[in-house]
Amino acid sequence: MMLPVARMCTGLAARSGGFLRRQALRPALYQAQQRCFSLSSAAKVAKDLQAEIGHEEEQYQQAKEIKKFLSGTSFKFVETEGDVNMNLEKEVGDMLVKIEWQLTSPFDPTADVEGEQEGGQEYEATDFCITMESKSSGAGVSFYCSTQTGEDHRYVIGNVKSFASTEEKNGDSSYNGPEFEDIDEKLQESLDELLSEVGMNSELCDFIDAMALDKEQREYIRWLRNVKGFMEK
């Protein structure tokens, strides 16, 4: 017996409606299961992060070189939370002296045995830049250096850059100056004396090395807290 067209369409609509509802439920159920799985995983991650935070905070201790230097220096130490860069700065007459460096990288694939100290402990040098700049003209000189071990000289100069303006100082294509070891020895000595006069010495190098590591440790703890906070939201 043929069903009236209206009844047949109603039946198809009812059956298709049930099918569509079941199809619509499947993604919803899957998404709910996925959310539960994600929340469960996030809770585990947060728990593990808290354990790591506790371990790092227990192990963290600021090096004595940091406290000693900051208690007796004329430099002002500047850093921003979450930023890898740090600097020391002070004014000497019309000249601004600025020393810039970054936190120690926790993983250095380029490290080699040449940087090892006695007893096999590896020493990681810290690259830094000393800039002396005229506040009135913007002209100045930058020394690109690295810390090193040794009692005679705690740092080496790579090259010396001069600039006539702030734009030239920050320019990507500006000439970076000669290699320090290639210039006249008497000029090397006089430039060394200049750096010593503005405060460059072994104690400052000790501070740079210690603070590079200290900053990395503090930023790692901050990272752990940020990730934990995200997982708990």
Image (cartoon, grey):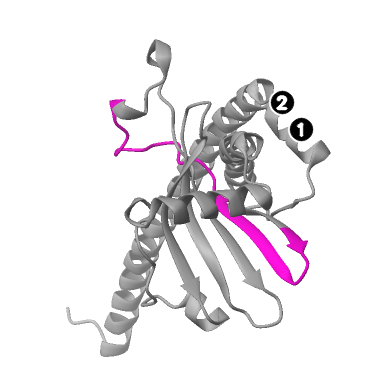
Q: Is residue 92 magenta?
A: yes
Image quadrant in which you'd find residue 131: bottom right
Residue ranking furthest to the bottom: 5
- Residue type at mark 1: give it: Lys
Viewed as shown, does residue 100 lie left or right of 147? right
- SS assignment at label 2: helix
Image quadrant in which you'd find residue 28: bottom left
Q: Quadrant of the N terminus?
A: bottom left
Residue at left 62%, top 79%?
138
- Can the viewer see residue 36? yes
Viewed as shown, does residue 71 lie left or right of 182? right
In the image, is residue 77 above or below residue 138? above
Relative image position of residue 122 (x, y in whole percent): 40, 23
- Can the viewer see residue 84? no
Q: Residues within 10 Å of mark 2 (few under 14, many from 20)?
A: few
- Residue type at mark 2: give it: Lys
In the image, is residue 29 above or below residue 166? above
In the image, is residue 108 above or below residue 142? above
Relative image position of residue 190 (x, y in whole percent): 53, 53
Viewed as shown, does residue 165 lie left or right of 95? left
- SS assignment at label 1: helix
Q: Which mark is residue 67?
A: 1
Which of 89 and 93 lies nearest the eye of the viewer? 93
Asked whether disc 1 touches disc 2, contact meaning CB atoms under 8 Å apart, the reply is yes
Q: Which residues are magenta?
A: 90-113
Which of 197 and 67 lies nearest the eye of the viewer? 197
Residue ranking furthest to the front: 186
Q: Which residue is mark 2?
A: 64
